[in-house]
Amino acid sequence: MNSSPANGPDFAHQRPEGLDDATVTALGKLSEALEVVEHARGLLYGFHRLTGTADLALGEAVDLLREAGHDDIADSIDREIVGRNVLEGRWTFQIVEDYDDNYYTAFKDAERSARTQLADGKRHLFEAEMKEDRRTPHARHHEARPADAS
């Protein structure tokens, strides 16, 4: 790190003494992988919400088809599609729960465990050091931390 603690990252983002570059880089890559999993999880929740919204709208469409006198079409759609599983035996909430319980939680736990064992639990050390390398010290909008802004 090329800055003093007085104008650099806060304590939570300072490299613990003795932590080598290779470990900081590895933890940075682990953090990056977790961020991708977080993004995937958000997309999965979006899929869950969109699919549920579509099913509710489909139910309304079935009611409107019935009101318009198209009972056979409404009955077919209602029977075959409304409330249908999106995967064998599963609605989207079950997919989300399975992802959370069997992948997401294990991934988060592994990342947290590695940080705890190797870096006193500190997060984003790689990024904090990248920020120090890229910012212009003492320049407005390049402050090390919010308290440094004037």
Image (tube, rainbow, N blue to C red):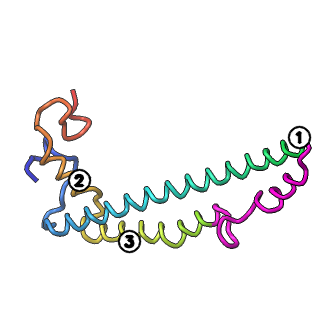
Q: Which mark is residue 84?
A: none
* Mark 2: amino acid: Glu
Mark 1 Cα within 10 Å, few/some/many (few <14, many 20+)?
Answer: few
Q: Based on the displayed image, in which of its 4 quarters is residue 106 positioned?
A: bottom left
Q: CA distance from mark 2 to mark 1?
A: 59 Å
- Seen at 74% across and 63% down, the residue is 84
Q: Secondary structure at mark 3?
A: helix
> Residues under labels 2 and 3: Cα distance?
19 Å
Tell me where residue 25 sits by quadrant.
Answer: bottom left
**Image position of 144 with respect to 73: above or below:** above
Q: Which residue is mark 1?
A: 68
Between label 3 and label 1, give the one nearer the viewer.
1
Q: Position of residue 130 (x, y in %)?
A: 17, 51
- The tag on residue 127 is 2
Q: Residue at x 42, y 62 (%)?
A: 37
Q: Report the front residue among 13 and 96.
A: 96
Q: Residue at x 68, y 64 (%)?
A: 91
The residues bearing labels 3 and 1 have C-alpha atoms spaced at a distance of 56 Å
Residue 4 percent location from the top left of the image: 9, 47
Q: Are marks 2 and 3 in contact (CB under 8 Å)?
A: no
Span colored in magenta: 68-94
Amino acid type, callout 3: Ala
Q: Secondary structure at mark 1?
A: loop
Q: Magenta span has 77?
A: yes
Name the outermost residue toward the top: 150
Indicate whether residue 40 is drawn in magenta. no
**Residue ID at (58%, 63%):** 96
Q: Which x, y percent locates residue 70?
A: 89, 47
The residue indicated by pointer 3 is: 110
